[in-house]
Amino acid sequence: MTDNQKTTHFGFQTVPESEKAGKVHGVFTNVASKYDIMNDVMSVGIHRVWKDAMMDWLAPRAGQRLLDVAGGTGDVSFRFLTRAPEASAVVLDMTESMLVEGRQRAEAGQKADKLDWVVGDAMALPFEDNSFDVYTISFGIRNVTRIPDALSEAYRILRPGGRLMVLEFSQLPVDGMQKLYDLYSFNVIPKMGKLIANDADSYQYLVESIRKFPDQETFAQMIRTAGFENVKYRNLSMGIAALHSGWKI
C-alpha cells in the first residue's frame, strides 16, 4: 500500500493520511482567536491546574532549552520560563495563526529574548539531533497524523538525559464516569464552540479526537517503543487528562 492510500482518523471520520494535516490546520485556524477562552470555558479553568501540574513534575531548571510542540499560543512555554527565567524556549506549531495569537500576549513581550516561534510539523521537526533538553506537547499529540513518527522525532531532537512530557486528554477508568463525561463532551462542548467561537464543527472534531486517542497504558507503551525509558504517567482529574513522562537515556 502506498502512502497516499493509507488512512487515519479525523475525529470519527476515516480520511487519507495525506489529508489529515490540512484538516487539523483548518480546525485550529478557525478557532485560533478564541482558543484560550474556549479552553477556560470547556475545562472550567482546570486546564490551568493541569499545566501547572505538568510544570511541577517537570521542575524546569536554568539553562534548559525547551521545545514546546503544538505549542499554539504559548501557555506551556510561558509557564516554563516563569519557573526558570534563565532557560529558553521554542514554540512550534503547524498553524501560524495560533502562533500569531501567542506573540500578541503580554507574556510574549516580557519573555521575548528567551522565546522563539516556529511554524513546523511534529513529524518532521526542523531542528538538529540532540538540540533540546525538554520536549513538551500539550493537547496536541492526538492531532498528529502518525503519532509514532512524532515520538521518534521527539527522541531524535532531545539530548541524552533529555525529557519528554505529554499532557493529553485521556480515558476515565470507571465506565459510569466516562459515560457522564461523554454526555457533557458531545452535548455541551460543540454548543459552546458555536456560542463563543461561532464554530461547532471544530469542537465536535476535538471531542471526537479525544475518544480516538489511546488509553494511558497503550500510549505509555508507544513512548517506550520510540526509545524512551523510565516511562510513567499520572492521571489528572480522575483520568480526564493524563501526564506522560519519558527520558532519553
Image (tube, rainbow, N blue to C red):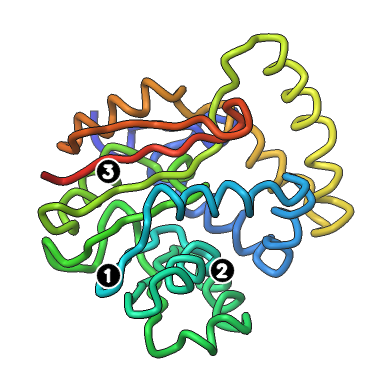
Residue 64 percent coordinates (x, y): 26, 69
What crowding class fits label 2: few (fewer than 14 Cα within 10 Å), some (14-19), or many (20 or more)?
many
Relative horizontal placement of residue 91, taking residue 23 as reference (left or right): left
Looking at the picture, which amino acid does disc 3 mark?
A: Leu
Distance CA(mark 3)–CA(mark 1): 18 Å
Q: Residue 176, labelled with which disc?
A: none
Distance CA(mark 2)–CA(mark 1): 18 Å
Q: Give the residue pinned by disc 1.
A: 65
Q: Do the residues labelled 3 and 1 touch (CB within 8 Å)?
A: no
Q: Residue 151, labelled with which disc?
A: 3
Residue 40 percent coordinates (x, y): 74, 54
Residue visible at 18% across and 57% down? 158
* Viewer-nearest residue: 26 or 141: 141
Q: In which quarter of the image is residue 151?
A: top left
Q: Give the residue pinned by disc 2.
A: 73
Relative horizontal placement of residue 230, taking residue 212 as reference (left or right): left
